[in-house]
Image (cartoon, rainbow, N blue to C red):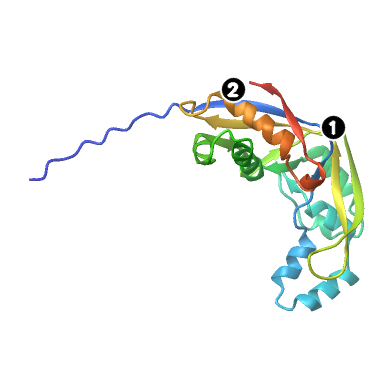
Amino acid sequence: MKKEEKVQLRPINVKTAVVTIVGDGDIVLNKMNASATRTLLNEDRKAQAVWEAQNSNKWEDIITSIHWRDGLNMKDTNKECCVEVFNNLLKYNAPCITAFGLKKSWCQAVVRNEVDTYATKFDNAVNVIAAGGLVPIKFAEWHIDERLMSPKRGAPVSVKLNHFTGWSADVMISYTDNVYSISEIVNIINLAGFGLGIGSGRTSGYGRYHVENIK
């Protein structure tokens, strides 16, 4: 008879903390909007792009280019005037940054600031806890920046960018301190906020932040 092997599970000492990050300038939230997504999904992209140009709804583009904490009722975005819808979203819902984007920038900060040669240890030791992978932000003011941008191919296109001023976010993390202590983790987050930021337009300096509080 084979001797049964006993499996011994070693407990993982997982700790949690809430890190409050505060913006040092505007954050720009601009994911792919609904009309651009429809064009990419449509096999006849040229025909779809022409249709979108003729039937464009700028408020649909503005609303759907943001991740929302409670999701969206897409029927509302089809209205000719979505100003009231958008204002209600800002009041009762919440714009969000992604947990994926945050952690990716923290891992990049580990390597770029020569904290470690690779980000593997940090990636394994720290997680962002966020429902739906989204971290809501608080903000003082919001405005739209409409500008022309030149894609790598094709003619310049008009884009509408959501700018949020006076922003902050409470980010819950789970971690094991056998590799990095909470002090080291928070300092890495601070380095990421200073040098990398979060959101769109980071190469132009948007989305920079610092750690203000840890619970």
Q: CA distance from mark 2 to mark 1?
A: 25 Å
Which residue shows up at 79% across the image and 69% down it? 153
Determine whether label 2 and label 1 are within 8 Å by CB. Answer: no
Residue 14 at what x, y percent from top left? 48, 28
- The quadrant the N terminus occupies is top left
Which residue shows up at 75% across the image and 57% down it? 32
In the displayed structure, 155 sits above or below 75; it is below
The amino acid type, in three-letter code, at marker 1 is Gly
- Dividing the picture into quadrants, the one containing residue 148 is bottom right
Q: Residue furthest left?
A: 1
In the displayed structure, 130 sits above or below 176; it is below
Mark 2 falls on what kind of element? Answer: helix
44 on left or right of 122 = right
The amino acid type, in three-letter code, at marker 2 is Ser
76 on left or right of 194 = right
Total numbered badges shown on the rendered structure: 2
Q: Characterize the local packing of mark 2: few (<14), some (14-19) or many (20 or more) Cα atoms within 10 angstroms.
A: few
First in residue order: circle 2 vs circle 1: 1
Q: Nearer the viewer, mark 2 or mark 1?
A: 2
In the displayed structure, 34 sits above or below 54; it is above
Q: In the rendered image, which residue does mark 1 sit on?
A: 166
Q: In the rendered image, which residue does mark 2 sit on?
A: 183
Residue 85 at what x, y percent from top left? 86, 49
- Dividing the picture into quadrants, the one containing residue 78 is bottom right
Mark 1 falls on what kind of element? Answer: loop
